Image (cartoon, coloured by chain):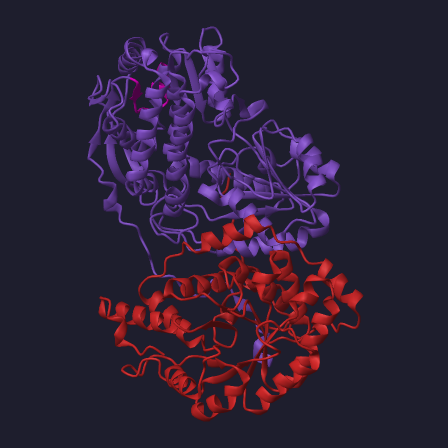
Chain colours: A red, B purple
Amino acid sequence: MSTAPLRLVTGDEREVHMPSVSTVPVIESESQLRGLLAGLSGVDAVGAEARAAKLATRSLKKSTKLAALDLAISMVDLTTLEGADTPGRVTSLCAKAMRPDPSDPSVPSAAAVCVYPDLVAHARHVLGASAVKVASVATAFPSGRASLNVKLLDVREAVSAGADEIDMVIDRGAFLSGRLGQVFDEVVAVKEVCATAHLKVILETGELATYDNVRRASWIAMLAGADFIKTSTGKAGISATLPTALVMLEAARDFAEATGAVVGVKVAGGIRTSKDALRYLVVVNETTGSQWLTPDRFRFGASSLLNDLLMQRLKQRRGSYVRADEFSGD
Amino acid sequence: MSDELTNSRLGAMIYDPAPESAATAHLKPSYGLFINGEFSDPSSHDPFVTLNPATEEPLANVAHATSADVDRAVYAARRAYDTVWSTTTGAERSKYLFRIARLIQERARELAVVETLDNGKPIRESRDIDIPLAAAHFFYYAGWADKLDYAGYGPDPKPLGVAGQIIPWNFPLLMAAWKLAPALAAGNTCVLKPAETTPLSALILAEILQQAELPPGVVNIITGDGTTGAALVDHPGVDKIAFTGSTEVGRLIQQRVATSHKHLTLELGGKGANIVFEDAPIDEMIEGIIDGIFFNQGHVCCAGSRLLVQESVADDVLRRLVRRVDQLRVGDPLDKNTDVGAINSAAQLARIKELTAYGEEEGATRYTSSCPLPDKGYWFAPTVFADVAQSHRIAREEIFGPVLSVLTFRTPDEAVAKANNTNYGLACGVWSEKGSRTLWVAERLRAGVIWANTYNRFDPASPFGGVRESGFGREGGRHGLEAYLNV
């Protein structure tokens, strides 16, 4: 018998396919939205967690690790969201974001600094013409428990003070009580006020509790015009987890395939080590692929992570660990 | 924004090699037979070489046990049974099993590397699945050894005596654990024959038995080929034969022991159906299909080698599946990022090639991963056949390789009918978010194991085994004790 000719999977078949014309459906009623969400596949929690755990065993070495560390640095939204924040604190954070390691100009700058709205103007002033963006949480962050008017005013002030990016929170109470149209409408309203500023929609996945909810909330945000969907505020008991990020990336991938619109994903809260960050990059690589492996489409909301990335970067180059004090504590 | 509307390449990040060190294996140049607690030379000097299937390089010389050696091993097992093991209390037997389990854990890294070198399976699987599960089986049955009175087989159930155990090459150490742990817990002594192409981890296990100070002769491990196995099956001093392997050999064994006093359990081939309903959790289901057929290069008797997809979602499932198959990383089994390793032997590779060629001849649509394959060694790129009909050979015969046959169905009745339309009956999977449907289907499937929204999950507490031409007898759980008790 002759050996069968190999019919190889083509390059075309291995990609995430996006239609060349963007066709995000226009949502005109809550029932239409419900119908769309009802058509989404469920998430099997055990399977999703097993998949994430399996991807977490990937081992990044040598040049892959160096490239991934630099990529991760460039994806950091360097964040300070404390009641005790001051202009001085924001100044040093901005300096750190622009030049994470002053002794090595080859280290990329962070993606953005993320502050409360009242400190946006100051951050804007310090960052000047730098490529580092100013991101601001808004919409009665972190609980979102305020009227729509208050939320929109919050956003409007942050944008007029110079914010490039707005991190809004969804109304989890509305979501959990089934008022999905209200969640959708709020995102649409905020997006409108954002004008040219990019909108990141925080789902606060720890409060949504199930992966099915995470998938539905991701779609609501994307349908309403989010530029990014973001896991958490960092203020809830449970923040970003690898399986949650996996479910959100799957949503972003499926949304891009269905509509042609590329929505980014931001993971925030509790990501402190390079090891964690690289695991997220592996999940991005194997779930959504090349289009999401850039700061335009994937971000880490973090503070102490940056120094660990710098430390690992230096360790990879020097072959031995350096003291933590080698880097500024900002 | 137009540049955003280009496609996204999955796996765009190139992973540098991340190999586990082969030196961790500490292999010796040659191994003798483990009889009566020590390694000894076989009666005739006729060793065979065990190869690394990923490189075709020799790993070690291994003794070829003759019928005289089998006789010696069975005699040692009989003497150990009569003089020591049959009078050792359950609590004492339990201590030995716990010791073995802990020693497997202590030497886990070494065992994982040995298994990967000898078998070709990815280090991720030997490290995360084979070795931990082998230890878990010893831990589990250690717990039963002093509780046999409460296992549901009456008060004070008796062991069978000397068990002859023949295991396959797909999970060498794990299958040894599946055989030895319940046999020892129940009070039997054993003669174990590992597969010809994968003897090494069982020989490391022999060292572990020495470390555990298991009394000499309680477990004897003899290496060899089919003739060694036949001598063990035919030996009159054996009270029980436990075999895991092909249906073809299982049939021969059953004929040969038919006229004897020997007890028999067989765990044979399969052609497992993975049934996907339109409401299945799609991302986890795709992973489950992948795990079902590409885990261990598809060298799994319970592999989900037939995919039955509801027609309404067939196109979407196939598209996602093919994309995922192409992402599988095939190559150096010692690399921690490898998903699919080497085919275990030249003979098996030839068999896979033969059957897949039939697939194309019969008109199925073939998708083969575009992953590059190493030049040396035995390799087969992960392959999916779509448009497969029930009558195709690739839908009926066990390929025992990384080859999936995709069929469609319209109604639950049709899914059940197609899943059951096989001579085998080892395992099936059902994927649906609707529990009542899953239960309805599971009740009607003729298979020993049914997985719901998962596939290829193993646990020592869960019995495993087949019906029809997939064999009889159960391994694992309370049920697994029955195979080694005179009940």
> Is residue A164 in view from this perspective?
no
Residue numbers of the magenta segment: B218-231
Q: Is residue B240 left or right of residue B48?
A: right
Q: Which of A35 and B74 is in front in this view?
A: A35
Quarter of the rendering occupied by the N terminus of chain B = bottom right
Q: Is residue A211 left or right of residue A52?
A: right
Say above or below: A288 vs B408.
below
Say above or below: B28 vs A264.
above
Residue B409 in which image quadrant: top right
> Is residue A220 in view from this perspective?
yes
Q: Which residue is drawn at 21% across and 17% down?
A: B43
Residue A21 in which image quadrant: bottom right
Q: Residue at x 24, y 35 (%)?
A: B60
Q: Does the magenta stretch include residue A255?
A: no
At which x and y percent is residue B304? 56, 39
At which x and y percent is residue B250? 48, 21
At which x and y percent is residue A5? 52, 49
